[in-house]
Image (cartoon, helix red, strand yellow):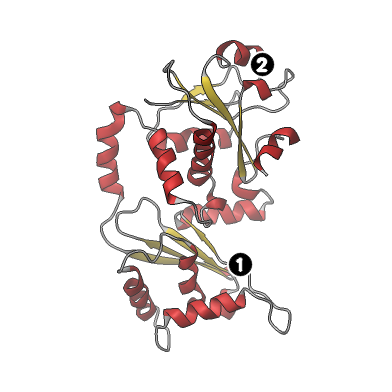
Amino acid sequence: MIPTITVFVSHPITEKENDIVKRFINLGFAPLVDATHKHSHVWFLNNVKVTDHRLYTFENQNVYFYDVNDLHPEMDFTPNVMIHWSEVDRKLEEEEWRLIREWLKYKFFTCYDYIDYSTKEITFADELMKRPFTDKRELEEEKLINQQDNYSFKTFFIEDKDTMLYEIWKPYTDLPYTSVIRNYSKRGHIAFFPTLYICNSWGVSRYDLPFLSFIWKQLDIKGDFDMDKMLKEATEKCYPSSKGEVELEPKVYRRTIDDVLLILQTQQDGIQCAHVFNDIPEEIKKRFK
């Protein structure tokens, strides 16, 4: 059973709304785009209420979900996305809708990518969010093209911010790991190596550590490669020293360097994650605290 995804957009469509549509397409879906009914309370009551659905709104670094009964007649807040199943006998449990919300956060919000998610939960939600059967063969072919069978590594230095970005692709993965090292001139390349272990998916392959050792040599770092020592020192730096100094927890994004550059620019401009759409009522926000 394949879900129907509707993206509600303005007329004309905004850049951020267009990003949502493109992201769903990149994930293998064929979303419907509605530029007519976004602010029509009557339309939602007449056409959506009878379906097994949830409405999803993106605000700052979060995703909130609710149903038609939560909408206000004046439509002072509006959904970005509606997900529903057309099958009459298809009715999701509340926990399944919650997992879809976690899946959306994981797939859409780059600011969440350095936080460890439960693999089982995301996998379960991904099975709920089946792609259209007509696209199945095409998607599998694309997957073979996009997923490489070896490791790769590159860096990018933002000189005016004294920030170094490190990107690693692992074999048979659809997204790389990009670490952000600030105050690079003071911390150097060594600060990069422990950062990857903030992700549960790093270190599970017996080839992960040898590849880091290879990078160590390629970067011509003096001294022996001792991962245990670096992890211990990095952990200690996260606690206040005798001088009261503490090093911020590292950030690792499951995005390319180009994507991370956009994220950093967006944060500098004062917009977290580049997704600010609505002012969600407190009665809905309270459900997710």
Q: Amino acid at mark 2?
A: His
* Residue at 48% in and 80% down: 230
Asked whether the viewer can see residue 254, the reply is: yes
Describe residue 81's horizontal placement relative to residue 23 as left or right.
right
* Residue at 30% in and 69% down: 207
Q: Secondary structure at mark 2?
A: helix
Image coordinates of residue 72 in percent, x first then y, are: 72, 21
The quarter of the displayed image where residue 62 is located: top right
Task: Check the image and report above or below for 87 versus 27.
Answer: above
Task: Check the image and report above or below for 281 versus 198.
Answer: above
Quadrant (top left/top right/bottom left/bottom right) for the N terminus: top left
Q: Which mark is nearer the camera, 2 or 1?
A: 2
Q: Amino acid at mark 1?
A: Lys
* Residue at 43% in and 50% down: 119
How far apart marks 2 and 1 lie (CA) works out to: 47 Å
Quadrant (top left/top right/bottom left/bottom right) for the C terminus: top right
Q: Tell me the residue that label 1 is attached to.
A: 161
Image coordinates of residue 236 in percent, x first then y, are: 59, 78
The quarter of the displayed image where residue 204 is located: bottom left
Of the two numbered discs 2 and 1 on the same chain, state the one appearing first in sequence.
Answer: 2
* Residue at 67% in and 38% down: 287
How many residues crowd mark 1 within 10 Å: few (<14), some (14–19), many (20+)? few
Asked whether the viewer can see residue 185, the reply is: no
The quarter of the displayed image where residue 209 is located: bottom left
How many residues crowd mark 2 within 10 Å: few (<14), some (14–19), many (20+)? some
Q: Tell me the residue that label 2 is attached to.
A: 41
Image coordinates of residue 170 in percent, x first then y, are: 34, 60
Task: Check the image and report above or below for 6 versus 154.
Answer: above
Q: Are marks 2 and 1 in contact (CB under 8 Å)?
A: no
Q: Secondary structure at mark 1?
A: helix
Outermost residue, bottom side: 223
